[in-house]
Image (cartoon, rainbow, N blue to C red):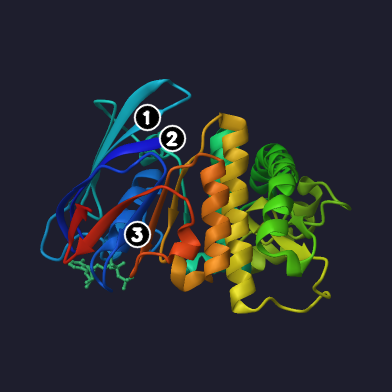
Amino acid sequence: MRLSRVEVRKLRSLDDVVVVPGRGLNLFVGANGAGKTSLLEAVHLMAYGRSFRGRVRDGLVTSDAPALEVYVEWEDHAQTRRRKAGLRHGGQTWEGRLDGEGVAHLGDLCAAFAVVSFEPGSHALVSGGGEPRRRYVDWGLFHVEQDFLPLWRRYARALKQRNSLLKQRGRNEQLDVWDHELAQAGEPMTRLREDYLAQLQGPLGAISGELAPMLGEATLEFLPGWRRDELSLADALLLVRERDLQTGFTSVGPHRADWRIRHSALPRGETLSRGQAKLTALTCVLAQAEHYAGVRGEWPVVLLDDLASELDRSHQRRVLERLARGDAQVLVTGTELPAETTLGALEYRLFHVEHGRIDAA
Ligand SMILES: Nc1ncnc2c1ncn2[C@@H]1O[C@H](COP(=O)(O)OP(=O)(O)OP(=O)(O)O)[C@@H](O)[C@H]1O
């Protein structure tokens, strides 16, 4: 997947910019507050329906403007054609177009255009709560496994129903119906998640060996959200029903699933340093992108925000070289042009970002 044009209007300090990225490495350089991250947020928004810094209504639209607009064109290798998508988003309401047609769900844009992002908040993938880790797995499955989304929707709907019944102290027969539905969707959904993490293990081990050899072997461990080795999901739900009726929410199931990484050189219980957590998070992001490329035959667009503040030069170089070997399109921001020692022989397109303007060098 290669972006050939990005237009952004009224997104934070970006009033009206047009960027024509190169096929490989693209560097966006400018002072603090110049608008570099805002450009990456615009691209991320098209692929996720939100920024990595929050939802559109959390300040993404330029103050006093009614709505932001993002338009992207990209080459889709799988479909051997040029594609285009536009989004106008006012925080509450939005309108989207894909290849000239209106879209009914933001998810339609997200399904068409794939992006992975690494930014200063990404370490939450390793050190934060379970939510970003679930979203990570589900994003991957959403793109590589077509059976996943219907199961996920079915599960989410049943969970909502069960929770509202619990709050109303519904009858057991009604709860039986939703427990059955949760189990019918939740069991296969969990098998897909488990299988996906097993598939990520290969690329993750290879990237971790290159970026963080001092941590030893990296192994992914899946936590399904209930004691799956002992109980079916239906039994687990029945077992906690009384307690759930008291608290008013469903305490076990795939909505509580999680995963973690074990490093062989790190004794159990020892936590990663902040720098190691960032490297591990980046390893996860790159592993997901590589796996996507293996299945779909092309890379997602890779966004790396403020890479130099996140990684030392030698790690930056290893990351950029690995992405160049994969022929990925990469958009990197920074306050300065990376050092010669970082860039080596890599070819790149340079953009200067200043006061919300973006100009090719
Ligand atoms: N809703 C908004 N309306 C107008 N301007 C905004 C809005 N939100 C943020 N800004 C401004 O947009 C600018 C864009 O910041 P952005 O985070 O993109 O900069 P950056 O170049 O990535 O900076 P840094 O290097 O500090 O991360 C900031 O100056 C900020 O004050």
Q: Nearer the viewer, residue 102 or 238?
A: 102
Which residue is identified by label 2? 1
Q: Nearer the viewer, residue 42 or 60?
A: 42
Note whether ligand 1 is within 8 Å of mark 3: no
x, y percent for residue 285: 57, 54
Cα separation, mark 1 vs mark 2, equals 6 Å
x 83%, y 75%: residue: 267
Query: Which amino acid type is marked by label 1?
Result: Glu
Which residue is identified by label 3? 55
Left or right, 14 with respect to 145, comes to left
x 49%, y 62%: residue: 342
x 57%, y 36%: residue: 293
Element carrying mark 2: loop
Left or right, 179 with respect to 306, comes to right
Depicted 264 relative to depicted 56: above or below: below
Query: Which amino acid type is marked by label 3?
Result: Arg
Task: Say which of marks 2 and 3 sits in front.
Answer: 2
Task: Say which of marks 1 and 3 sits in front.
Answer: 1
Query: Which amino acid type is marked by label 2?
Result: Met
x, y percent for residue 193: 69, 44
Element carrying mark 1: strand
Note whether ligand 1 is within 8 Å of mark 1: no
Cα separation, mark 2 vs mark 3, equals 25 Å
The reply to whether callout 1 and callout 2 are in contact (CB within 8 Å) is: yes
Q: Nearer the viewer, residue 40 or 210?
A: 210
Q: Residue furthest right?
A: 230
- The quarter in which the N terminus is drawn is top left
Mark positioned earlier in the residue sequence (1 or 3)? 3
Task: Give neighbour class at mark 1: few <14, some 14-19, many 20+ (Cα, 10 Å).
Answer: some
Which residue is identified by label 1? 75
